[in-house]
Image (tube, grey):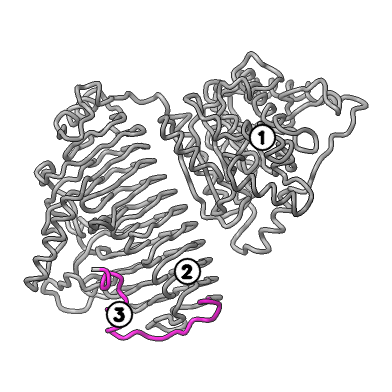
Amino acid sequence: MKKLSLILASILFASCSIAAGAREIPRDTSFTLYSTAKKVLRKHSEATVFRPAMPQDIRAHRDMVYSTLSRTPYGKRKLHADVFRPDNDSIYPALIMIHGGGWNSGDKSLQEPMAIQIACRGYVTIPIEYRLIPEALYPAALHDVKAAIRWARANAGKLGIDAGRIAVSGCSAGAQLATLAGVTNGSKRHEGKGGYLGVSSDVMAVINIDGIASFVSTTNIADARSHFEAKHELQVNAKWLGGLYDDASENWHEASPLEWVSMRSAPICFINSELPRYSDGCDELVSRYDSLGIYSERHRTGAPIHPFWFFNPWAETTTDYVATFLNRVLKNAGTVKEYRITDYGISADSTVVQTAAIQAVIDRAEADGGGEIVVPQGTFMSGALFFKPGTSLRLEHGAVLKGSDNITDYPLQPSRMEGRSIYYHAALVNAYHVDDFRIEGPGTIDGNGFKFWTEFWENVAAAEAKGREWTNLEVRRPRLLFLWGCDGARVRGVRLINSAFWTSHYYLCNNLTIENCYIYAPSRPVRAPSSDAIDLDGCHGVTIRGCTLDTDDDGVCIKGGKGVDAHLSHENNSVTDVLVEGCVFGPNLHGTLTFGSECFHASDVVLRNCRLDNDCALLRLKMRPDTYQTYENITIENISGRCGNMIEILPWRQFFDLEGHKGHPRGTIRNITMRNLSLRASSLGIIAGNAHDTVDNFLIENVAVKAPLRVFRCNYSPEDVRLVDVLVSGKAPEVMPANEQMKASMNYDAGDL
């Protein structure tokens, strides 16, 4: 590292001279971490300032000159960058980082906390200075960003970076600039002038943290006009662009990333708050990326504030999103051998089942030492596929892996269903003990479940007509995705839709990540019964981020085993260490976060920063009187939107069976926290388990619910279930017990089926 440090020090020394007699550069210092924290912490008690310490193995080189502008109103103008990197001589990818502040204020030090953390993940991070409104209007800032990229690439050897792996990120106004820089790869119109003009300013990836992708929406144009008419001054975006839209339309269009998407545009990751004004144009940009087959990710932090990257509980999550995206795009690209199925005689024909041919490609990849099975654009029909060690699956834009609707295409084999290890039909996509298995989007896995759903409801009607009970397993239906014992598995950016049965089922998987997925099954014209979005069955260390879940059953369902001896069987397992964040839970669901009906122990589960748009329970615990159950250390926080009962903890007696045992299995609920919730709901809900169930240390805190009913049904003492700063339609809830008839009527499925 000494050699690299000496090189960096020499660059830094050469940059320190300041032109004598130059006019002072005007500054707006209104946007600082201090001023932002004063506003945020006053209104959000849950927020804490994100201030990571500088690790000993990270080195900082500050105020390095990346561009010198010889002719400005302020003399010879030097633009500076800070460099953070691991303290060694290795070569790393680089990330140019752009601060926010409305193109008007702020400085590069605002990016330092995140820069330090990303550098710890094996990157060279470079927060930069750029010209703001008091000094120069658009396009000066963009030209500065492009110059910084060229400088980093030209000095790659001195800086210890890989010139072929440079990304750009930004927050707020900086995010707009980063997006514009990455979308306009190869655009001479946006290049500007400055140093190293013979060097490319192309980037390989873009991270947009709560920044707009278009200025030219009807809303933006109208807001700027209204602001000017009301206050007789230009709104900050209009000021930066040189006037209102009618006066500077060329700049408004030229500065809008959405206008410049092309095949050369870089993959992008959006990380957003819950404030829609800061994501204007992002949906449309992603749609254009999809049409061109360019990779993109969308993440929602659930943050109710705009500058969330300065504060926990959102800053560390944001850093994880950034690092994960960079790892995928910059570090993993091109390292895995591809097996494109159309190269092996497989055609895009949605009418022909091609299971054997696709399986042969998977088997060949395994025999060759591993590789990625690539499904290109088109629809490919198949029955059950079995992925082998070393193989993975990627579905490109427009790719559809469609399931056969013939159950004979899904063979019976050892499997896991409804809390029991049994022989059952394979899923469409299966992986047994394939560690580090990957499924990557943005394509689709379609279960083609219509025929199975219709047959299921016909069977239900026939059973009810005869007055007999029926079970989910009577009509044989395949799941969409089943992973058994796959440690380190990743499912990212894929669409999982129309499953005939459970959509994705993970059994005995450790260190599992499910990220940025869209999981859907319809409720009309024919409902997709028992199409749970994500079933975690005896799994440990699970992260679910940025997903949209909207199936005709549970969203995230915690399983693990059922029955009087479930806790004694080696086939069953607890579910522990689960994080669900930044997700959207849609209107078809029966439960947002559900424990049971096949679960005997779950611990350390966190649901945070999510949005609800449904009529079911936020937290649902199914209490089986025939199973010893323990649900503990569960935290739900920072949730907004619409739901049914906020809480639903009720007996679950479906298929009750003591299996000849005497006694009374009981449930234990302890250390549950629900806080910082803002919801429209049917009621606060109900906590009323079986007669022998116990509840201890259940805290509901800082909750505001708008609901037609103020009654909260709770059969446990105020010491066991504590309400602190809880309001229902602006008033304290009326706490009342529930009798057995009420318990039965308040169960979601009692009214649903």
Identify the secondary structure beneath mark 1. helix
Q: Can residue 116 be seen in this view?
A: no
Disc 3 and disc 1: Cα gap in Å? Answer: 62 Å
Task: Answer few, some or many: residues within 10 Å of disc 2's Cα (few below 14, many 20 plus, some between 14 and 19).
Answer: many
Earlier-in-chain disc, 2 versus 1: 1
Disc 3 and disc 2: Cα gap in Å? Answer: 22 Å
Disc 2 and disc 1: Cα gap in Å? Answer: 41 Å
Identify the secondary structure beneath mark 3. helix
**Residue 28 pos. (x, y %):** 80, 43
Where on the picture, by quarter, is residue 170?
top right
Q: Are marks 3 and 1 in contact (CB under 8 Å)?
A: no
The residue stretch that appears in magenta: 727-752
Residue hosting label 2: 680
**Residue 71 pos. (x, y %):** 82, 21
Residue hosting label 1: 249
- Of tags 3 and 2, which is closer to the observer? 2
Q: Residue at x 27, y 50 (%)?
A: 503
Q: Which residue is drawn at 19% across and 37% down?
A: 385
